[in-house]
Amino acid sequence: MKSSLRFQILSKKQYKSMDAVFIAFKASPVWAVLRFLLTLIQSLMPTVAMTFAMAGFIDTANAILQNERPHNDIYLPLFLMLLVLSILTTIGAVIALVTTRINLDISRKLKPAIVKKCASLEFKHIENSSSWELISRVSRDPVQAVMNGFNGFMQMQDITISIVGVLIVIVTQVWWAALIIIAFSTPMFWLSIRAGKKNYQASRDNEKYKRRAEYLDEVLTGRENIDERTLFGYSEHIGKRWMDQYEISRKRQLKVRARMFLITKGASLIQALIAVLVALTLINPVINGDLTAGMFLGIVTAAFNMIMQLGWKMSASLESISHVNEYMKDLTEFWDLSQAEGANLEPDPEPIIFSKLEFRNVRFKYPTSEHYILDGLSFLLECGFHYAFVGKNGAGKTTIAKLLTGLYTEYEGEILINDKELRTYPASTIKALISVIYQDFAKYYISLKDNIILGDVADQKAVLRALPAMGLAGVDFAGLNDGYDTPLGKIKEGGQDLSGGQWQRVAIARSLISRAPIKILDEPTAALDPISESKLYNDFEKLMRGKTTLFISHRLGSTKLADQILVVDSGKIVEQGTHIELMELSGQYAEMFESQRNWYK
């Protein structure tokens, strides 16, 4: 329930810049209200309060120097001025603390909502480059984006109240000076908003260059590539390519910022000149006695402070607001992305009893392609047998696994499990039914034991049975300092890395302890040499006797173990049978096996 409430901080709607404030108030209502009140106090202090406190102090001091008032009269205006100054000094620190708390509350509630949405997206959005860039922009730092917008609006509140206060004071003394300032300040709003929009659009345009530069940066500095960097000495070549992408991004952003900086700050200088002119025009009223010296200094100080607010702070705050407005457009588009039904459901506690699986004339093409990767695919698999799908790269083997696991549901034809269409099953049932080990399996930098527990968090005791079974005990992992509790990877102190083959055994053990009745191994042994691959498949076959397994590979180390071998080519099954039957057929399978025969001797 708690997670569900967090998820409700966002909903399907047309987001605007002001929603940054609403999200902050929804995530942290008490602290957001306090921030609003503190900002209100802060905005009144340096304008109205400070103007009259300064004017009172200077006029009183002047009167005392002219022996028109007793010396004791100076204490009250002095106390009032010091009080205003002390409030100004401390309120900023309090606002910073309150803002930090709001940031934490937003992070605690907004980030899980974004993550949960990402986890529930249809898989086609993950594999599509344009939607993935949108996802990356929105999810990269949503908390900072919202906080920048919230702070921008709070700054605008501060600036607006300060300006209104100063203008009221000036109007009561010299009304025409206030009108001049207003006339020249209005264009600043438009310029600042335009600056923010231009900057965010430049950031969006730069996204592809930034991603390329970040990838190349990882190639140049990442730990994963250090061996090949040293061996092939490609750092200089990749460094040049990284510099090209980085420079394109930097120059595009700099061009926009430089142009908007000149426009907005040039206008600020003009306003500063106007403030000087206003100060000069107030000299005569002072000389004539219509304006006291204290009030003159108070108004001039407030006027210059207001000009600073208009020229610099307002520019920054309006730019932040415009920036978050563009982010909210992305957030709206992101939240409109279609979700896979039941994507965030946990697997059923117990899998269904599996009897058979059938593909009937299945045709499928990826959303961004016109080419059918599966084109009339039909086959029948029964419970308790081992099957091997083999074929050339790009034949459609991995696509079969994606359809079976529900990553894509927009296929033609039928996929039947126990004579029932796959799409009619809840996602939780499919998750409990099938366990997959992909070629690009995940490496989790947690303990060895926790790595494998992820295969079935409901039955953690099964870990102890799976570790020795998959060769995860004894000599293979003798170097782990803390045994099964050793952190893997180099993130934690005392962490140790594994070889490619060891990581693959961890992934296989994770699948092994899963209670899913169907096990799919999609090129899981690519990092193993053929002899180790063959041995691992033999070990796996012993453990999986009586269970249903699907081996997907273009390497044929697993095929002799299979009860049936299905050869996939151009999205169809072109050959099917046992190893002996297919070798006698002397077709595509026999040709592939003969080309790899020496690997497995």
Image (cartoon, rainbow, N blue to C red):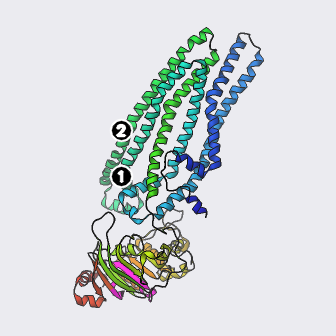
Q: Nearer the viewer, residue 32 or 467?
A: 32
Q: Secondary structure at mark 1?
A: helix
Q: Residue 586 placed where, x, y %?
A: 22, 87
Magenta segment: does it hold 381?
no
User: Residue at 51% of width from left, 26% of height from top?
Assistant: 182
Magenta-drawn segment: 540-564
Q: Count the labels in the image.
A: 2
User: Residue at 45% of width from left, 57% of height from top?
Assistant: 336
Magenta segment: does it hold 561?
yes
- Mark nearer the N terminus (2 vs 1): 1
Reading the image, the residue beneath label 1 is: 208
Local packing at callout 1 (Cα closer than 10 Å; few below 14, some 14-19, many 20+) is: some
90 displayed left or right of 425: right
Q: Secondary structure at mark 2?
A: helix
**Quadrant holding the N terminus:** bottom right
Amino acid type, mark 2? Lys
Q: Residue 13 placed where, x, y %?
A: 49, 53
User: Disc 2 to disc 1, how far (Cα)?
Assistant: 18 Å
User: Residue at 33% of width from left, 55% of height from top?
Assistant: 235
Q: Residue 505 placed where, x, y %?
A: 44, 76
Q: Residue 39 placed where, x, y %?
A: 61, 38
Q: Is residue 389 in view?
A: yes
Reading the image, the residue beneath label 2 is: 255
Q: Is residue 350 above or below residue 248?
A: below
447 displayed left or right of 204: right
**Quadrant holding the C terminus:** bottom left
441 displayed left or right of 450: left
Amino acid type, mark 1? Lys
